[in-house]
Amino acid sequence: MQRVKNAVRSRSIHVCVVDTGSCNGCDIEVLACLSPRYDIEQYGIYVHNNPREADVLLVIGAVTPQWEDKLIALWEKIPEPKAAIAVGNCPISGCVFNRHDSYVSAPASKFIPIAAEIPGCPPRPTEILSTILAIAPLAFKDFERERK
Amino acid sequence: MKRTVDVSFPVGPVHPCWKEPARVKCETRGEYVLRAEVELGYMKKGIERIMKGRPWQEVMFLAERVCGICSVVHNMVFIETMEKISGIAPAERAAYLRVVANELDRIQSHLLANFSYCYTIEHETLGMYLLDLREKVMDLLEKLTGARVNKAYMVPGGVRFDIGEETRHAILGSIPRIREETKRYRGMFSGGPMIGLRSKGVGILSREDAGRCHAVGPTARASGIAVDCRQRHPTYMKLGFSPVVRDEGDNFARVMVRFDEAIQSLSLVQQCLERLPEGPVLAGGICRAGETVHRGEAPRGELSYFVKTDEYGRIAEISIQTPSIMNIEAAAHYMMTGAVSLADVTSIFISADPCIACTER
Amino acid sequence: MRSILFYLREFIRQEWMRKFIFVRTAPLLTPAYFRDFPVRTGRECTHCLSCMMICPAPGAIEVVREKGEWAPIIHKGHCIRCGLCVEACPEGVLTSGFVLERHAEQKTSIRAEYHIQIDHERCMRCGNCCVACPVNKEVDPQMGAGGYSSNDEVIMRIEGGRQRVIHEERCTGCKTCEETCPNMAIRVARVVEVQQEGNDEARV
């Protein structure tokens, strides 16, 4: 039973994208994943943009002051089991914005637990795709057993 | 004045239709939108503050990251501002290559904007076709610059990488196919009866209103104002450029202007590559002190940089004016007011092609 | 009705049918010309630090000593894959996509010079900058805490109650002095020019 659940979970992933102040570059690379060339949906990944239905949260952007509390609230709305992936340099290190005098408060792992990071400014769609596919079976494996 | 308002209806900040956080507050009576207001401020990073006191090789990358969709034009306008300050003339071959990169970037930006619009009016088939076409343009850009989104292609005095003979033929060879497909999708958009119902006569921005709210770019050109900064750019003047203008001023016209401009950009790229002069791509030159304002045409409209540098070419003061802020105002105050249905609010907002990352920096 | 016909016409096109039935997603490869994270070519690094000085991203590249040899390290998550370090390196230690190849083809070079600017109104003559400077340390290891030195080869020293820059041309642009200055009185300007060989016109 558990094995069936694991297999099903890793084949149907609902993704929510949240932009916490990026330059838009990573946004359009996530969007490009939808395109017929990369076709994210053939792997059972569905970009939903609704945190209540999501399994995976893609965090994009260095966290701006407006998002500091909202990101945590959004994370809490996602039902278990869940995983957050940091897309691009911004949520990992702040990228070029992480300088004296800027408003960003990177990294995003200060606010929510990040399961995987995709470096690059921005990462290629293939990198995003393979990371989501790689993280899904690991993050959702034996979820019921671990909760007990 | 007392107004009767049924519901003040918020759209956003996280909304399935727009990829960036923005919030639209609509005051409604029934389905009828009385007034709309856009609230911004979710993406403020303070880029202009970081830019101060840094040399061009660092600011160039920050300028690119003002907006990821139209990164080439930000790079281009910033570098041209620095060249204007320091009196550097770019190499002739580089000037043409800049236009090639800029126009390819404009095509992918317009296709993306049209994809978002089609996606918003739930015409996903056409949206996916456009997104697929955009990937082909991205391939050409990648061949030219070596990166997909933030290209870092231009430096003071020229461009970083020369175009090889092989790449030139590859780009020239794929232009007819892209043009043919763009024309086909344009025909699908203009001929689709359901699309017409959702787009024609929705979100009308009259010529007077467009002038009043200083709309720029395709939003203004769809309302009959022939404004385009490329008319004053020396390289574009050699290519015989004239802007695309339509008079309807509704959602349909804005999307069609973008289609037409994409087709026009393709022929500009073709012209540039065909008459590409031989020679070096870099002229060299050191950035010096001075201050100036320079304007360029981003895919969304007029983009202007005010830059003041100190004796070693570091940025002392900088102020960026991006096109989206005017278009967002136009969308909120003129197009949305009087929209018959709340369902049109998202499509009107997307048709003005707002770029929140640009607007707030 | 018209729209149903429209879709029917769209879906019986031969190209659409062919694509619908036969097309699978092509193997998604990263093309060779893509500027990926720089990797080492195996040539010897001379520890000139040109790559670190040009890097626009904070903390993206570091030159460290590895098994008795200097070697640049790229920090993923900080590196923005701009490829400037590849171009700036005079030895060709790093490579990334087509950057190194095109760079050699076009004979482009990045020339950097560094200028030290001192705000004498703010300077307290503590000598921290002179002591911290790594070039000074190499030239005159005996330099005392006050930044005094009898060696004429140092970049800067405290002389007669004033900070004086003697050899600006030796500065490597590392900005160590800027970081150690308690009063933000010293600033290093990195002036960079990108040039191409065989191009003498349009020189300013």
Image (tube, coloured by chain):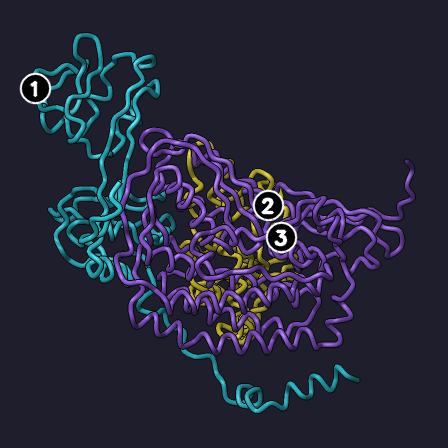
- Picture coordinates of residue B72, whole percent (x, y): 44, 54
Q: Nearer the viewer, residue B348 or A76?
A: B348
Q: Quadrant of residue C165?
A: top left
Could you tell me which chain the residue with mark 3 belongs to?
B
> Which residue is found at the position 45% from the left and 35% from the top?
B292
Examine the rendering and report whether any part of residue A105 can be seen. Answer: no
Say whether residue B259 is visible: yes
Secondary structure state at the residue bearing disc 3? loop
Q: Are marks 2 and 1 on the same chain?
A: no
Q: Is residue B60 left or right of residue C141?
A: right
Image point 75% across, 81% down: which residue? Answer: C3
Between disc 3 and disc 2, the foreground one is 3
Circle 3 residue = B354
Q: Chain of mark 2?
A: A
Q: To which residue does mark 2 refer? A: A72
Q: Is residue C169 above or below residue A144?
A: above
Instruction: Give coordinates of residue A53: x percent, y percent.
Output: 65, 61
